[in-house]
Image: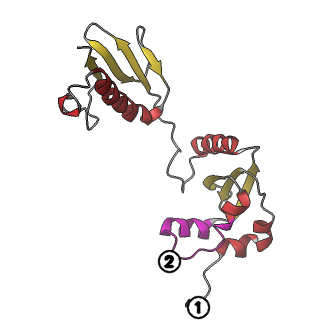
């Protein structure tokens, strides 16, 4: 049994933009920019299907949406659509717009991350693994990765430890390595 609503859920964007806007939205991938009455970009998003994604914004159910989204929907005056030829292109365009515009309602991706590299070299002591922002001579490297370099190095250190020292196991691993606390550079001894 379903309960009928006494009052229908608010639909601020349908009231402002009209139902035809949502019906005519492209089916393909793209980016959408939500703007206020002063034409400021409030939010940038990307979608595999713009029509399906925008349909999500049609109803502003206060029981299902966070207050932040409800505030956004009450503020939007128009939505600009930019079609892209595929989803990776839409993701790249969204990333570019987020860093360029830094919209008020977007939280992630609005600032460029620090470029980090996972670096390694063989020394007399063993295999040395580090996370660095600049590649130095004598080191091999992978990246740039951003913040993902830190957990990747921790994972590589644990895997290399287990491969080089299977008889010691995880219990014989240096203190803190299992939880990812490796310090500036971690050296995996060769013997």
Quarter holding residue 139: top left
Give the extent of the magenta segment: 55-75
In this figure, which residue is indicated by the disc labeled 2? 63
- Of residue 105 and residue 171, the one placed in the foreground of this image is 171
Residue 150 position, x and y percent, is 37, 32
Q: Residue at x 40, y 8 (%)?
A: 138
**Label 1's element?**
loop
Residue 50 position, x and y percent, is 71, 57
> Going by the image, does 177 lie left or right of 63?
left
174 in magenta = no
Is 107 drawn above or below residue 36 in the view shown? above
Quarter holding residue 186: top left
**Label 2's element?**
loop
67 in magenta = yes
Q: Earlier in the sequence, mark 2 or mark 1?
A: 1
Q: Residue at x 77, y 61 (%)?
A: 25
Q: Give the label on residue 4, or none.
A: 1
Q: Dot 2, crowdedness within 10 Å: few (<14), some or many (≥20)?
A: few
> Going by the image, does 63 lie left or right of 101?
left
Q: Is residue 147 visible?
A: yes
Q: Residue at x 20, y 26 (%)?
A: 168
């Amino acid at each position: 049994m379903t309960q009928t609503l006494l009052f229908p859920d608010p639909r601020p964007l349908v009231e402002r933009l009209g139902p035809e806007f949502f019906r005519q939205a492209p089916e393909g991938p793209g980016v959408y920019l939500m703007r206020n009455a002063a034409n400021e970009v409030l939010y940038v998003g990307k979608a595999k299907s713009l029509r399906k994604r925008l349909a999500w914004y049609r109803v502003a159910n206060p029981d299902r949406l966070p207050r932040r989204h409800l505030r956004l929907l009450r503020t939007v005056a128009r939505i600009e659509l930019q079609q892209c030829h595929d989803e990776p292109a839409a993701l790249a365009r969204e990333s570019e717009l987020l860093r360029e515009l830094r919209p008020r309602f977007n939280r992630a991706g609005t600032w460029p991350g620090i470029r980090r590299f996972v670096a390694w070299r063989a020394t007399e002591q063993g295999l040395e693994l580090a996370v660095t922002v600049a590649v130095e001579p004598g080191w091999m490297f992978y990246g740039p990765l951003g913040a993902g370099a830190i957990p990747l190095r921790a994972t590589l250190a644990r895997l290399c430890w287990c491969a080089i020292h299977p008889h010691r196991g995880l219990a014989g691993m240096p203190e803190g390595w299992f939880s990812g606390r490796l310090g500036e550079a971690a050296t995996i001894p060769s013997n």
